[in-house]
Amino acid sequence: MTVAKGRPGQGGVRTVGSRGRGASEASNVPFVLFCLLITSTLLHLGARLPILGMMRIDLLLGAAALAACWLVRSGPGPRPPASEEELRVNRRLYILFAYIFLTVPFVQWPGSVIKNGLEPFVKAVLFHFLASWSINTSRQLGIFIWLYTGLQCWRVLEPLYLHLAYGYWGSATHVGGGEFMARLSGAPMDTVNPNGLAFIIITAIPLLYFIGQRATVMVRILCWCLIGALIYALILTGSRSGFLVFALLVGLWIWRSRYKLAAIVAIIISAAAIVPSMTDLQKERYLSIFRSDVASAESAQGRIDAVFQDFDVALRRPLFGHGLGTSAEANAHFRGYGQVSHNLYTEVAQELGFVGLAIFLSILVAVGRAAVSAVRAAGAAQSRATLDDSVRVAADSILTLLIVNVVFSFASYGLSDPNWYMLSGLAVATARLATRSAGGSVPSPERSATKRAYPLGRY
């Protein structure tokens, strides 16, 4: 045992035993395993290294991380009480779980739920609990934000490098008249299409922005260089939904900027430099968002029509739905197009019915409240100089990513995608750490505080 004397004027001594160090080291094990799981999942290490795939590395890491969390949380010593935000989100997730299991006998295809739907959904939801349970310090939160940002950037820079060096595209889309346009998708070992790659880009850009806000000059320059590379990759994806969300982020940045005129001038100069480098097909692809007389306009209208058709399919089983994981099956039977609904909300309505959709939306509301609570608590702690920069970066980033997810989900599926549930776990963990830094209190949502809570602002 080591003994450390207190400072002059402070009574008593502080003892640190081997048991305390062991407990601290043990609490890091779930976090390390969770970071390894995220790395393996995002980089698809099982596909890149066949021996890891044969070992079912993601399953092993997930089970190990979950077991480590349980051992630490059930170990000796007091466990900190769950926050109000954590209880609210967890309670609604449990309700969704119960609803899915209890309604299996009443859905259209219960066999498909058991065979194909439950496993990916359970694996995805576990990311919520792993994130909220394994991240318990501001240092862990900062490390995870850096790791997640780096992994997402790698997933974009890898196909971008292959494109620049070898002419790799990865995908193509029909633009009408028998003509096709090449589109950049994920690397050969990744599993994302162009829209999926665009989603990765628009999640990485806010992370880089907020990291750069509170970093050294060199790191800030690096972040802006990476943002430029990611914007170029976004153009190559030809993703209209990604472009619209990026435009939303730019608008929020201009609105919250201290120097609005300078920001607008910078955007105009950047656009003037980028547009001439685009091909005619790429220009028409983005113009088709609001024009009907250009190539790709037919596919843009088709995407809108598909949402209404998917909604009609959902209305065939409005109460309990067709079953978890059966969106593609339902569309194949009733639309003649066997593909998962490219709209999260119609996907949920098709699979879980409108009752399930209401429960899922209530989870999103709870996660949103946790994200806003984290930003408000971080603002209160910052005013007292008791906040770690990593918590401030995480709070701002998670609120922005939540907005990005909600908007982008109008053009993407994801009920059983781990991204949603990892984000909810991060929101809960960040709210807990920010509230702790604020002394356990969160200011009332006054008008000025609400304005500061918006993302992409300068603090």
Image (cartoon, helix red, strand yellow):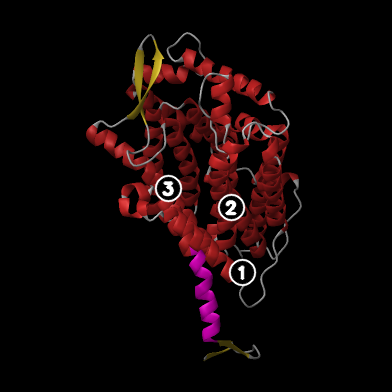
- Crowding around mark 1 (Cα neighbors within 10 Å: few <14, some 14 to 19, many 20+) is some
Identify the mark at residue 73; answer none if there is no mark: 1
Q: Earlier in the sequence, mark 1 or mark 2?
A: 1
Q: Secondary structure at mark 3?
A: helix
- Crowding around mark 2 (Cα neighbors within 10 Å: few <14, some 14 to 19, many 20+) is many
Which residue bears the numbered disc 2?
128
Q: Are marks 3 and 1 in contact (CB under 8 Å)?
A: no
Q: Whole-percent x and y of residue 57?
A: 41, 55
Amino acid tagged 3? Leu
| Left or right of 381, for residue 152 | left
- The Cα–Cα distance between marks 3 and 1, rounded to whole angstroms, is 27 Å
Residue at the (50%, 35%) spot, across then down: 263
Question: Do we see residue 79 in this rendering?
Answer: yes
Identify the mark at residue 229; answer none if there is no mark: none
Where 188 sits versus 214, above or below? above
Q: Which residues are magenta?
A: 17-31
Amino acid tagged 2? His
Residue at the (28%, 33%) spot, across then down: 163
- The Cα–Cα distance between marks 1 and 2, rounded to whole angstroms, is 16 Å
Q: Is residue 24 magenta?
A: yes
Where 175 sits versus 439, above or below? above
Residue at the (42%, 46%) spot, across then down: 152
